[in-house]
Image (cartoon, grey):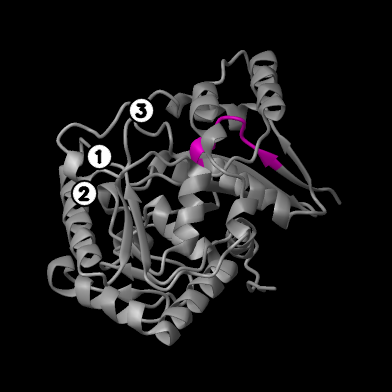
């Protein structure tokens, strides 16, 4: 019997190249291709609205059995009930306990991040086929050329480095529409600068810069230079510890996924989304409730205690390799779709 993966050609590459790589890594003995049949093209109704970035749909054809899967990598924990009815598995990056209880087909994926997986010729070919077969101009083409192409390939994450002993790299984007997120990050940058003055750490970073300089009003919090994605990752690999706070809409930001992929010692405020497996504060990350009263001591302690730091690093990487890497995310979905026990290599 035929074993194949059929994928919807309408998806935001900024969010979903990660999972398409996972499909190719996991289903090595399957035929994997895009489908232009009507049930795949119906996702075109979402590309100009609030769910533009939300869905990547695919079908698993396995010896006569078919399972329909939607991956939703958007920031909010809400579930689209129309799509929910179409699928057998609704896999979400950002999901809370309430949604898990209300919607039994929902599963948690945990954090991801953008990677560049398609070559430009491959994405041009997909864009051309979408227009030829369905008369649809690819609504995500500019996303690919202006955003996805600037991301590193997944291989860059696999080239990990040992952390330095007292170096802390912290770089974030200032969200104008999400002032609560930006203001919290301003306070963290201020604290890190103070620790640098006290010679507890050597701090580098701040808010990322616009093309011609710091963002207005953030001159005192801005990084000294611009970093492309590869340079950002190379500095991050060396950071003694990393700091995580919820991103916009309290979501699991891409940085959290990157921290796990690189095997970093993570200091984080409470993570209010459901993560897969036996995810635990104190084991996979060091939790603090309040940055004002706890962050300084947490950084100082981990900088001084290399053994504890290395244990957090090892646990974070092990969790990534079991649950969050692209192929392991797809393996998790497959095990749910076909009600099989998840076997982790």
In the orientation shown, which residue stands out farthest toward the right?
1
Q: Which residue is mark 1?
A: 175
Give the magenta-colored segment's residue range: 6-15
Q: Residue shown at 33%/76% (left/top)?
A: 286
User: Which quarter of the image is occupied by the C terminus?
Assistant: bottom right
Which mark, by number, is residue 211?
3
Between residue 233 and residue 143, name the one nearer to us: 233
Depth check, mark 1 against mark 3: the one in front is 3
Q: Is residue 9 magenta?
A: yes
Q: What is the C-alpha distance between the residues marked 2 and 1?
A: 7 Å
Q: Which residue is mark 2?
A: 181
Between residue 232 and residue 45, name the one nearer to us: 232
In the displayed structure, does residue 199 sit left or right of residue 47?
left
* Cβ atoms at labels 1 and 3 below 8 Å apart: no
Q: Position of residue 330 (x, y in %)?
A: 61, 57
* Cβ atoms at labels 2 and 1 below 8 Å apart: yes
């Amino acid at each position: 019997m035929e074993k194949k993966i059929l994928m919807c050609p309408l998806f935001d590459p900024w969010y979903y190249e990660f999972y398409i790589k996972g499909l190719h890594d996991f289903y090595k003995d399957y035929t994997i291709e895009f489908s232009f049949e009507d049930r795949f093209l119906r996702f075109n109704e979402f590309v100009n609205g609030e769910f533009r970035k939300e869905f990547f749909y695919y079908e698993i054809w396995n010896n006569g059995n078919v399972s329909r899967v939607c991956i939703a990598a958007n920031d909010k924990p809400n579930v689209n009930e129309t799509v929910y009815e179409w699928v057998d598995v609704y896999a979400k990056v950002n999901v809370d306990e309430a949604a898990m209880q209300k919607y039994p087909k929902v599963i948690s994926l945990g954090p991801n991040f953008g990677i560049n997986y398609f070559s430009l010729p491959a994405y041009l070919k997909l864009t051309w086929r979408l227009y030829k077969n369905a008369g649809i101009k690819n609504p995500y083409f500019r996303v690919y050329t202006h955003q996805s192409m600037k991301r590193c390939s997944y291989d860059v994450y696999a080239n990990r480095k040992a952390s330095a002993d007292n170096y802390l790299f912290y770089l974030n984007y200032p969200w104008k529409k999400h002032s609560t997120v930006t203001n919290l990050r301003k306070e963290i940058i201020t604290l890190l600068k103070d620790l640098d003055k006290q010679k507890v750490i050597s701090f580098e970073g701040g808010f990322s810069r616009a093309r011609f300089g710091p963002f207005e009003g953030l001159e005192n919090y801005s990084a000294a230079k611009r970093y492309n994605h590869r340079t950002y990752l190379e500095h991050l690999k060396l950071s003694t510890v990393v700091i995580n706070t919820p991103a916009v809409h309290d979501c699991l930001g891409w940085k959290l996924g990157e921290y796990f992929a690189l095997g970093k010692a993570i200091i984080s405020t409470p993570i209010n989304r459901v993560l897969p497996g036996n995810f635990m504060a104190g084991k996979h990350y060091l939790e603090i409730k309040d940055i004002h009263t706890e962050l300084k001591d947490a950084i100082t302690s981990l900088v001084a205690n290399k053994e504890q730091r290395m244990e957090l690093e090892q646990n974070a990487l092990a969790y990534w390799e079991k649950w969050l890497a692209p192929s392991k995310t797809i393996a998790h979905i497959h095990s749910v779709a076909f009600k099989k026990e998840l076997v982790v290599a």
